[in-house]
Amino acid sequence: MQYEDINDPIEVIALFSAGKLQPIKFRWRGRVYKIQRVNGRWESDEGRIRLHHYSVMADSPDVYEITYNPDRFIWKLDRVCMEG
């Protein structure tokens, strides 16, 4: 496995239901990735801001870590774990 820190802004389509945020798909570098599975979710604090992190898989064995910042209404792709 190879980890690559990315830290790029991304566009995300997400569902907000029953008080939970669920990412559905994201666009990174012009390509759309449909999320097949959420492996995990956690929160962290950055100063007064609570960030929402997701480990997701799309249509490949790679794992993507994406983060939502509700204070700035932005999503980022933090890192990719590549299987190859």
Image: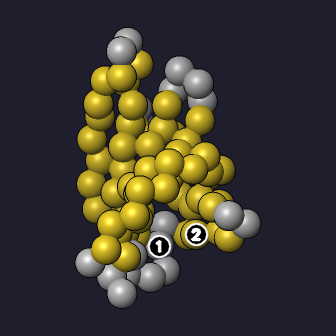
Residue beneath the point at 65% across and 50% down: 11
Query: Measured along the vertical axis of the image, is residue 84 above or below residue 68?
Result: below
Side (left or right) of 10 relative to 51: right
- Which label was assigned to residue 1? none
Q: Which quadrant: the C terminus?
A: bottom left
Quadrant of residue 29 within the rendered picture = bottom right
- Which label was assigned to residue 58? 1
Query: Measured along the vertical axis of the image, is residue 46 above or below residue 26?
Result: above
Say which label, 2 or 1, has the lower sequence index: 2
Quadrant of residue 18 within the rendered picture = top left
Residue 47, position as x, y percentages in the image: 36, 15
Residue beneath the point at 34% across and 57% down: 55
Real-space Cα separation, disc 2 to disc 1, in angstroms: 6 Å
Mark 1 lies on a secondary structure that is loop
Which residue type carries mark 2? Tyr
Residue 72, position as x, y percentages in the image: 59, 24
Mark 1: few/some/many CA within 10 Å (<14, 14-19, 20+): some
Asked if the residue under mark 1 is in contact with the one under mark 2, i.e. CB atoms within 8 Å, the reply is yes
Which residue type carries mark 1? Ala
Query: Measured along the vertical axis of the image, is residue 4 above or below residue 20?
Result: below
Residue 64, position as x, y percentages in the image: 41, 62
The residue indicated by pointer 2 is 33
Side (left or right) of 3 relative to 69: left
Quadrant of residue 56 within the rendered picture = bottom left
Residue 26, position as x, y percentages in the image: 59, 59
Residue beneath the point at 28% across and 62% down: 39
Mark 2 lies on a secondary structure that is strand
